[in-house]
Amino acid sequence: MSASAVVRPSSSQPAQPAPRRARWRSRMRPLLMAAPIVILLAVMLIYPVGQLLLLSIRGESGFTLAEYQRLFASSVYVEVLLITLKVSLYTTFFAVLTGYPIAYRLSTLSGARKQRLLFWLLLSFWTSFLVRTFAWVVLLGRNGVVNRTLLDLGLIDQPLSLLYSFPAVVLGMVHALMPLAVLTMLSVMENIDRRLPSAASTLGARPGTVFWRVYFPLSLPGVAAGALMVFVTSIGFFITPTLLGGRHETMITQLIIDQVMQALNWGFAGAISVLLLAVVLVVFFVYDRMVGLSTMAGGAGDVKAGKRRGGWTRTLGEKVLATLGTATDLLLRAFPKGRGTQAEQGDGLVLRVVVFLLVVFLAAPALLMIPMSFDSASGLAWPPKGFSLQWYQQIWDSPLWMQAITRSMLVGIGAGLLSMLIGTPAAFLLVRGGMRGKSAMLAFVLAPIVVPRMILAVGVFYFFAKIGLVGSSVGLTLAHTVVAVPYVVITMMAVLRNYDTRLDLAAYSLGARPWATLRRVTFPILGAGLLSSFLFAFATSFDELTIALFTSGGLSTTLPKQFWDEITMQISPVIAAVSTCLFLFIAALIWVAERLRHRGLGSLAT
């Protein structure tokens, strides 16, 4: 009996630690996967922005509200806030209004036609804001394309003052942010069940009624998400208002730049940042109450929020949609019918013409820089005179431009690699992990997109000034990684959702070990997605100006900062040559990314 008592415990003890180790590993794995991105955002986003906000209430003798009293004591700052809200609301309305037909058309297309349209949209999305804004300076100037064309046609006697006005600012910002609205709405529209409009058509509903009574209500979450993203982005803009607007179009971000770069008043800059952040948070709160934050990830919206919109508002909305449907049907009778039902296929003549004109609107300003970069004259005038490569030669011979290009390339590669290494485990965790609170984790990961870039840039600048990283390539790489890593997470989440895990299980069942499965099955399929995410992160870093404006230093700046300095000092054909190079470079990146994505899908299919 005593022998058996000794034997039984000794025979059962070795089996106990294994389940404990397995449970410990299963608990630690999500923490280890989330740790890199959590540490990055905590150190490079939460702490710097928190420090900046604390400066607004910290005086020499402790807690103070003097900066906020100064902020609201003068009507100037309130007027600037109202101007900012006005510009942002106009931009949001027109960007969503003009972007909706493109998103609708894209959601109904497939194959080569969809890829061509998506290429031009992505090209507009990733082309530098500086290039697009500078193009509008050339278009709307007194000797620009618009005035020269109107003068040659005899429609005007003298050049019009089109620049430095409110319409010019709104036009430039709509042009810059329309692709963002389209891509946000498209993520929802692609998930709409096409059988629903078909069923309505089968029951006798006309195309206009089908669209307004069936399809449009289903797309409203995407419209709301697109409007939110455009508004939050536009409220933190400073490039377009600075170059296209006058003193009556000053945005709140321009005040922050002045307080930091000229007055060195960190406390007042922090107070303005708090005001800007408060506006953004209020917008998000209202959006969550009305629609639900789940729509930002392509969800169908909050059911409770939908119930709160019931009653007379829902009845009024249905009547308005019914009226719009009837009016649309009357208008469609005047146009020839396309193949099948226009509301089902999105292939009507009117829609094709509208989308074509909108794509021309998006692409033409940047394309305009190409012929002007070969102008033999010394000034930017339309039409170009002669042909010359002298402006490209000036770029090649200029140490400033070449150093800026080299630094942007190195920082972009570093930020792309670091974003890929940090963002890929987070994407795996969000798609395949069994952790709780995935929605909160996703919101945390997307915080760099939500927080106005200017607040992040000023906070990082203050943080870097304390630790001696201002002007260093390491600091720039870390700061750019913060704004690039969300794009890596979003890209890899899309790749992982389309990845069939049964391929890994099949390899295991055939005797393959984990490393062999990773090398021969998993990585060849995910490799294209990884490279694509790296290219998007690289493009984000390569075009980043706001952070570089503060932290790049004066000795060796980045290409966007050098571009910005050149524009603010003079208008030269060299800038057109740089714009052409940037445009072609981004086009090549998008083409490579699309080829990699197709290769990944091909590997997945085989």
Image (cartoon, rainbow, N blue to C red):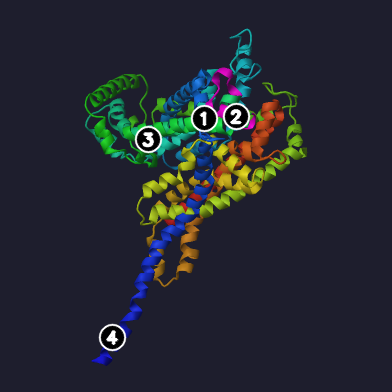
CB under 8 Å between discs 3 and 2: no
Spatial CA distance of label 4 from label 3 is 64 Å
Instruction: Identify the residue shown where x is 56% and y is 33%.
Output: 267
Q: Amino acid at mark 3?
A: Gly
The span from disc 4 to disc 2 (Cα, nearest Å) is 77 Å
Label 2 environment density (alpha carbons within 10 Å; few <14, some 14–19, many ≥20): some
Q: Toward which corner of the image does residue 373 lie, by quadrant?
A: top right
Q: Residues within 10 Å of mark 3 (few under 14, many from 20)?
A: many
Mark closest to the chain's N terminus, 1 or 4: 4
Q: In this figure, which residue is indicated by the disc labeled 3?
A: 222
Percent of width and height locating residue 285: 37, 34
Q: Which residue is mark 4?
A: 8
| Disc 2, SS | helix
Residue 219 visible? no
Q: Residue under label 2, please give it.
A: 259
- In the structure shown, which secondary structural element does the residue marked by tag 4 occupy? helix
User: Which amino acid type is marked by label 1?
Assistant: Ile
Q: Amino acid at mark 4?
A: Arg
Q: Position of residue 213 (x, y in %)?
A: 27, 28
Q: At 73% across and 29% down in the image, what residue appears?
A: 387
- The residue pinned by badge 1 equals 272
Region of the chain picked out in magenta, as a range: 243-262
